[in-house]
Amino acid sequence: METIFSLSNLLVLPFWLLMITLPRWRATERIMRSPLVSAAPALLYLVLVLPRLAELLPALANPTLAGVAALLGTPAGATIAWAHFLAFDLFVGRWAYLDSRERGVSAWIMAPVLLCVLMLGPVGFLLYLAARALAGRRAAGAALSHA
């Protein structure tokens, strides 16, 4: 499990580096437009979960703090959770990246936002929603001043 855990980061880091360091590069946008970007960590999650489905389903169908803690407290459980985080954080980061490009949110603002999505998932998502709202207000204000 240690090797799988360590190598799993390699499934997502190239995409994060592209979005954060080369956001305006045409290849970055072309790559990130593919919904398959999150497929590799999702597939890893599936491969890790399927053999353990019988033990996971009861704990997930009726979750308790002690039951979830017991699942996550094992190398297999932590690796499965990590693959889940990698897949969903990249999915959210990809959405934020693409949405920010369409809305004209500055790449300088998006770099730390995407870093927060990578490191803190939901915190980065909330930061992006705030940046998106501010960019929308700025665009609306600019449109009014030109009218």
Image (cartoon, rainbow, N blue to C red):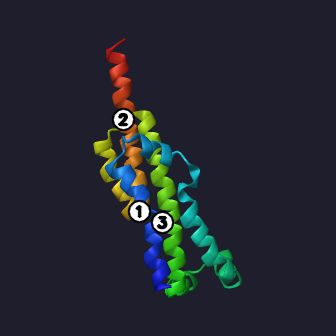
Residue appearing at x 71%, y 83% in the figure: 54
Q: Residue furthest front?
A: 27
- The disc, 2 or 1, on the residue closer to the chain's N-terminal end is 1
* Number of marks in the rendered image: 3
Query: In terms of secondary structure, where does tag 1 sit?
Result: helix
Question: In the rendered view, would you say 71 is above or below 15?
Answer: below
- List x then y, in percent, for residue 137: 37, 31
Residue appearing at x 35%, y 37% in the figure: 134
In the rendered image, which residue does mark 3 sit on? 11
Question: In the rendered view, would you say 123 is above or below 46?
Answer: above
Of circles 2 and 1, the one toward us is 1
In the rendered image, which residue does mark 2 sit on? 135
* Cβ atoms at labels 3 and 1 below 8 Å apart: yes
- List x then y, in percent, for residue 97: 43, 46
- List x then y, in percent, for residue 111: 32, 50
Left or right, 16 with reference to 32: left
